[in-house]
Amino acid sequence: MMEHILSRDNLTTALKRVEANKGSHGVDGMSVQTLREHLKQHWRTMREQIEQGTYEPSPVRRVEIPKPNAGTRLLGIPTVTDRFIQQAMVLSQVCEPLFSEHSYEGLDGWMRRRLRMYMWKQWKNPRTKVKRLQSLGIPKGRAYEWRNSRKGYWRIAGSPILSRALNNKHWKESGLQSLLERYKNMR
């Protein structure tokens, strides 16, 4: 696997992709135009670090970009060198065979919990929370009990009450296919 990542063909393709994407500089200030020269001078050291597992990516540069409907969001810009190494990794081709069925189970569960968290956040008003929970089959008393919970969104998303209300059946009826099912169908 490491031989594929560090092969001349793969590295050349990665370099061409980074150059074609252009993009802004990272925290080091190096531009895409100077990447080839930088690699000529420092590739041996970088290669050794990658092979030994001691290579550490640089911090990302944080930039605020405007959102379409007011406000801003933070964007992380990696260094050009880190983008080159990321391209060389070709995650979909290299890592996909390493994923097991259990990896998808964990990811599927995490995503469902994340969706429950977003739903709980959307229901902002305590009255809305009670109505929604009751419409999903939670008894009135339990719904009232949870509406004013001081627990954080992530913690509530893992609670038995939301797990029961926004269960797999709910997501399937909403049109969300399980990642695990999708993985099995694709294999």
Image (cartoon, helix red, strand yellow):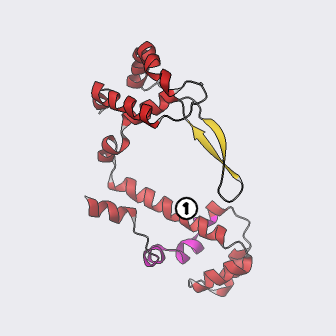
Give the camera-side residue of 41 and 94. Answer: 41
Residue at x 36%, y 39% (from the top left corner): 90
Q: Position of residue 130 (x, y in %)?
A: 68, 81
Quadrant of the rendering where the C terminus is positioned = bottom left
Q: For the residue marked with disc 1, what is the amino acid?
A: Arg
Q: Position of residue 169 (x, y in %)?
A: 44, 77
**In the picture shown, does residue 131 fall above or below 64?**
below
Give the camera-side residue of 139 and 65. Answer: 65
Query: Does residue 135 show up magenta in the picture?
Result: no
Image quadrant where residue 176 sits:
bottom left
Q: Position of residue 112 (x, y in %)?
A: 50, 65
Quadrant of the rendering where the N terminus is positioned = top left
Q: Which residues are drawn in magenta?
A: 156-174
Residue at x 33%, y 56% (from the top left corner): 101
**Mark 1 highlights which residue?**
114
Query: Does residue 158 show up magenta in the picture?
Result: yes
Residue at x 62%, y 80% (from the top left corner): 133
Magenta stretch prevailing secondary structure = helix
Q: Position of residue 116 (x, y in %)?
A: 56, 68
Question: Is 159 situated left or right of 149 in this image?
Answer: left
Question: Is 187 situated left or right of 52 in this image?
Answer: left
